[in-house]
Amino acid sequence: MDREDCPVQKLGYEYFEKVVNMIGGKWKMRVLYILGLNKILSYDELKNALGNVPHNKLTKQLKELEEDALIIRTENSKILTKVEYSLSKKGYDLLPMLLEMCNWVLKYEVEKFASAENQTHSTVN
């Protein structure tokens, strides 16, 4: 592929870096995915859904997602310790891109599986 044909060349590295800063990190895309599935979750529900995530790491990445306006943090006035999280419009608009990334993985996993199947059948014959 020639560099002129490269789809990211027109973008500029600074925009790519902004994307990496917004959704990079071990837990950020997982948080977006889980909130996309569940709409609203308390901190504890989100932490349980993520599995073995350290409290300080999750708190830091939730704060960064909130600062980047990808999620909304709401404090429950009735229960002082209850905080809920949901996707913002900006975060919701990111879901189709997460789906495309999953489709990309699926495409190559299917090709990998098909290639392995072909190798198995060719060695049997």
Image (cartoon, grey):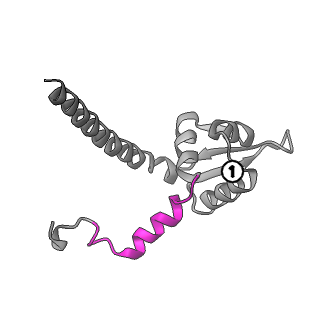
Circle 1 packing at 10 Å, graded few (<14), some (14-19), many (20+), is many
Q: Give the camera-side residue of 73 and 5.
A: 5
Report the number of discs.
1
Task: Tell me the magenta residue range.
Answer: 8-26
Tell me which residue sits at (45%, 50%) in the image: 94
87 on left or right of 78: left
* Image-quadrant location for residue 61: bottom right
Residue 37 position within the rendered picture, expressed as x and y whole percent measured from the top left? 53, 35
- Please state, as top left, top right, bottom left or bottom right, where the C terminus lies in the image: top left
78 on left or right of 63: right
| Residue 38 highlighted magenta (yes or no) | no
At label 1, which amino acid type do we have? Arg
Tell me which residue sits at (41%, 71%) in the image: 15
11 on left or right of 125: right
91 on left or right of 8: right
Q: Which residue is mark 1?
A: 73
- Work out whether 100 lies above or below 118: below
Tell me which residue sits at (15%, 29%) in the image: 122
Q: Mark 1: which secondary structure?
A: strand
Q: Give the camera-side residue of 74 and 107.
A: 107
Tell me which residue sits at (35%, 44%) in the image: 105
Q: Give the camera-side residue of 115 and 35.
A: 115
